[in-house]
Image (cartoon, rainbow, N blue to C red):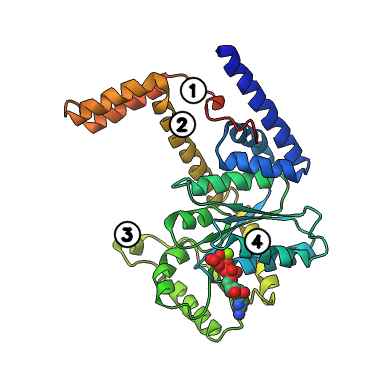
């Protein structure tokens, strides 16, 4: 029994090490497999990421968020084109694209127009938000670390800015771009406040549409006034950490995109001058806390603890124990047990 489990760990470790090394060496198939393993939180994903982690940290991670249809995917394609002209490598994580096929085709077409599109310097990956409740930010952060270690200079993470978790994904980037489009109606106004909170750069896309200038002026006025919040007391007393620049782009023609790239580079350079950025610490927090929660749940599910946990819950249900004492007791029990090996999570031996 112990032998079988040891062999499983060895196998997972060897496969993970091979995938990690091939990924760093530029093997895109290995990269894709490792990303799948990381996304599914398998043992191979964990071991692979651990091996790669020291090699990551060089990439500029850019979150691109905004309301549905504001032109995020089109802008990502335009950014890829611009970055490729400059010979820079770029990876894209598209979180739960609402129209993956169209989006993919759109990106594919635009990327194919570039001379170096097939040379492996562009990598596009879709990631499903479903099934990652609460862990979406940590999963995409882990995926970004893999792409970072694989050597991509820029990593763009596209998320729809509708829910809190999607906004958190964008906020875990070094630079967060919030897209708006002119004349998008009241619905957009409602989510603007929360979205603007996380913006390092605000981009009014569809600059060819009437009202783009006016929308940009309105946003500038909001930001200068310190608006763009929900107006609650805690929000009013909290100092606004960012004073984002507002730019205009037309993603379909590429107008304003070179200026956007320059603004991204400026933000990146400013972040580097400031030392270990708050964005990086936020990323570390998102990742480590998610793993702590995963580990705790896994240990409570571990056969040796399951009965004790059930008994403790029973005591709380009977009011013989208060829920705080129960939580403290379970935490004590968790910390007394040996750390379960990653091989105890389902192995992706067939991937
Ligand atoms: N006129 C104009 N149309 C644009 C521009 N950018 C994007 N579009 C169009 O707007 C529509 C939505 O663009 P997408 O890039 O798919 O928008 P998105 O924000 O990625 O949408 P979701 O991923 O569904 O949230 C498409 O029909 C684009 O062609 C622009 O600068 N000008
Ligand atoms: Mg899109």
Mark 4 burial class by Cα count in 10 Å: few <14, some 14-19, many 20+? some
Marks 2 & 1, CB-CB < 8 Å contact: yes
| Mark 4 → mark 1, Cα distance in angstroms | 41 Å
Q: Is residue 35 above or below residue 198?
A: above
Side of 89 where 93 appears, left or right: left
User: Distance between the Cα atoms at labels 3 and 1?
Assistant: 40 Å
Give the distance between the C-alpha atoms of the residues marked 2 and 1, in whole angstroms.
9 Å
Q: Tell me the residue at 65%/21% (across/down).
A: 10
What residue is rendered at 41% in x and 21% in y? 303
- Say whether residue 260 is left or right of residue 113: left
Residue 63 or 8: which is nearer the viewer? 8
- The answer for how far apart the CA atoms under marks 2 and 3 are is 33 Å
Instruction: Give x and y (percent) for residue 31.
Output: 70, 43
Q: How many labels sit on residues?
A: 4
> Which element carries disc 2, helix, strand or loop?
helix
Where is mark 2, residue-wise? 295
Tell me the quarter of the image containing the C terminus.
Answer: top right
- Which circle marks residue 339 in the picture? 1
**Tag 3 or tag 2, which sits nearer the N-term?**
3
Is 196 or 5 nearer to us in this picture?
5
Quick one: 250 or 100, which is closer to the camera? 100
Q: In 3D space, how far apart are the residues under numbered discs 2 and 4 (Cα atoms)?
A: 35 Å
Answer whether labels 2 and 3 touch (C-beta < 8 Å).
no
Q: Nearer the viewer, mark 4 or mark 1?
A: 4
Taking the image as shown, residue 229 lies to the left or right of residue 142, namely left
């Amino acid at each position: 029994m112990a032998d079988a489990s040891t062999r499983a760990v060895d196998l997972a470790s060897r496969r993970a090490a091979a995938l990690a090394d091939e990924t760093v060496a530029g093997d895109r198939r290995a990269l894709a497999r490792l990303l799948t393993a990381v996304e599914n939180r398998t043992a191979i994903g964990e071991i692979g990421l651990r091996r790669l982690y020291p090699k990551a940290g060089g990439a500029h991670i850019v979150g691109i968020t905004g309301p549905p249809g504001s032109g995020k995917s089109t802008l990502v394609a335009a950014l890829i084109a611009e970055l490729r002209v400059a010979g820079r490598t770029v990876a894209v994580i598209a979180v739960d694209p609402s129209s993956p096929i169209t989006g993919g085709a759109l990106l594919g077409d635009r990327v194919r127009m570039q001379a170096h599109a097939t040379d492996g310097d562009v990598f596009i990956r879709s990631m499903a938000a479903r099934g990652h409740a609460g862990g979406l930010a940590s999963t995409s952060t882990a995926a970004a670390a893999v792409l970072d270690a694989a050597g991509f200079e820029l990593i763009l993470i596209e998320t729809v800015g509708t829910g809190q978790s999607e906004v958190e994904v964008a906020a875990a980037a070094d630079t967060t771009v919030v897209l708006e489009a002119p004349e998008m109606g009241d619905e957009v106004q409602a989510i603007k406040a929360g979205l603007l909170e996380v913006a390092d750069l605000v981009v009014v896309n569809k600059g060819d549409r009437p009202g783009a200038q006016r929308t940009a002026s309105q946003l500038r006025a909001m930001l200068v006034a310190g608006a763009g919040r929900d107006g609650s007391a805690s929000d009013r007393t909290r100092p606004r950490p960012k004073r984002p620049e507002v730019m205009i782009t037309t993603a379909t023609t590429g107008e304003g995109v070179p200026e956007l790239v320059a603004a991204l580079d400026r933000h990146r350079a400013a972040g580097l001058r400031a030392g270990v950025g708050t964005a990086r610490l936020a990323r570390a927090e998102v990742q480590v806390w998610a793993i702590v929660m995963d580990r705790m749940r896994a240990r409570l599910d571990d056969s040796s603890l399951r009965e004790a946990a059930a008994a403790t819950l029973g005591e709380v249900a009977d009011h013989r124990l208060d829920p705080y004492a129960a939580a403290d007791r379970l935490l004590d029990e968790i910390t007394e047990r040996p750390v379960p090996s990653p091989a105890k999570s389902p192995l992706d031996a067939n991937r």
